[in-house]
Image (spheres, helix red, strand yellow):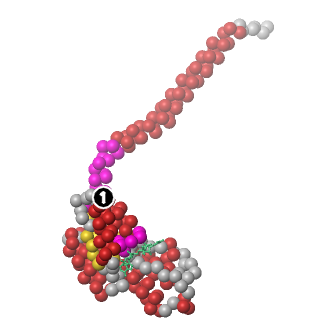
Amino acid sequence: MLKEEPAGEEIPNLFQAIYSAMIHWSRLLVGGIALPLVFPWLVYNLYRSHFKNKIFRNRSLEDKVVLITGASSGLGEALAHAFHKAGTKVILAARRKDALEKVKNDLITKYPSKNTPVVLTLDLHDLKRIPQKAREALDMYGHIDILVNNGGISYRGEIADTDLEVDLRVMVTNYFGPVALTKAILPSMLERNSGCIIAISSVQGKIAIPFRSAYSASNMQHKHFLIP
Ligand SMILES: NC(=O)c1ccc[n+]([C@@H]2O[C@H](COP(=O)([O-])OP(=O)(O)OC[C@H]3O[C@@H](n4cnc5c(N)ncnc54)[C@H](OP(=O)(O)O)[C@@H]3O)[C@@H](O)[C@H]2O)c1
């Protein structure tokens, strides 16, 4: 004969079952998921906070010697601001001395620093004089930590209407000039086993577009020489 259970006992059993299940799942969550994630996270953050200063100090740009070509305007000028602000010893290079002096004065006025920027007149098209100019730059602080090959010219025109002289000027200024400067500075970096060479290149060195053949070609060469 079927014996009916009293309804009053079923409810406490159900609560007990739910309660046990909750305890079981919370333990699983804390022990199985939270702890394995939280513990490494804590260790990582402790490590970071402990070594943060050391890491940043090692990576600091402060007092690094940076030679920026094409520093008299545009991107080079903007880079000069960024590097000077970061506490580096900036060498501003380009052809126009007055424009470079203006950039130098702007830097001094805007960001007080123990390092005063210096000006170096340099013509990237004048290949014969580049080794001498590189020596002048090296003599300023005894070495160069970062060379920023930024200086260059742009050109737009149809191939048929463009004199070979123009192609040569664009190629020498944008490609052979930076190559000559890099070759003149690189040995001193290798000797010190330290140094960084940055190449500012255009996306047009990768994707050629109409009327930009000379410029695109010079940027492509530049990219492939400096970023092998
Ligand atoms: N603007 C862009 O959208 C863009 C995009 C991609 C790549 N880039 C590249 O970024 C670099 C800078 O471009 P930008 O837009 O800032 O041009 P920008 O304002 O015309 O500046 C060019 C700089 O190069 C210098 N320069 C030109 N001929 C030189 C020479 N023979 N010897 C030494 N310095 C010379 C100029 O100074 P002096 O006249 O005083 O010599 C000037 O400081 C260029 O290499 C360019 O190809 C630019």
Residue 36 drawn above or below residue 135: above
In the rendered view, tell whether residue 123 sits above or below residue 58. Answer: below
Which part of the image, by quadrant, shows the N terminus? top right
Q: Is residue 218 left or right of residue 52?
A: right
Q: Quadrant of residue 222?
A: bottom left
Q: Residues within 10 Å of mark 1 (few under 14, many from 20)?
A: some
Q: Residue 204, position in %: x, y? A: 51, 75
Q: In what element is the residue under mark 1?
A: loop
Expressed as whole percent of the image width and height from the top left, the position of residue 48 reads: 35, 45
Task: Give the residue at x 32% y 64%.
Answer: 106
Q: Is residue 195 visible?
A: no
- Residue 58 sits inside the magenta stretch: yes
**Left or right: 38 in relation to 55:** right
Q: Residue at x 30, y 47 (%)?
A: 51
- Picture residue at 62% right of the left edge, 16% below the top: 15
Which quadrant holds residue 71? Answer: bottom left
Expressed as whole percent of the image width and height from the top left, the position of residue 201 reads 44, 73
In which quadrant of the rendered image does the C terminus lie?
bottom left
Give the residues in magenta.
47-75
Q: Amino acid at mark 1?
A: Tyr
In the rendered image of this protein, does residue 15 appear above or below residue 127? above
The residue that disc 1 covers is: 111
Depth check, front residue: 3 or 193: 193
Q: Is residue 32 visible?
A: yes
Q: Nearer the viewer, residue 54 or 161?
A: 161
Whether 78 is drawn above or below 208: the answer is above
In x, y percent, where is residue 102? 32, 70
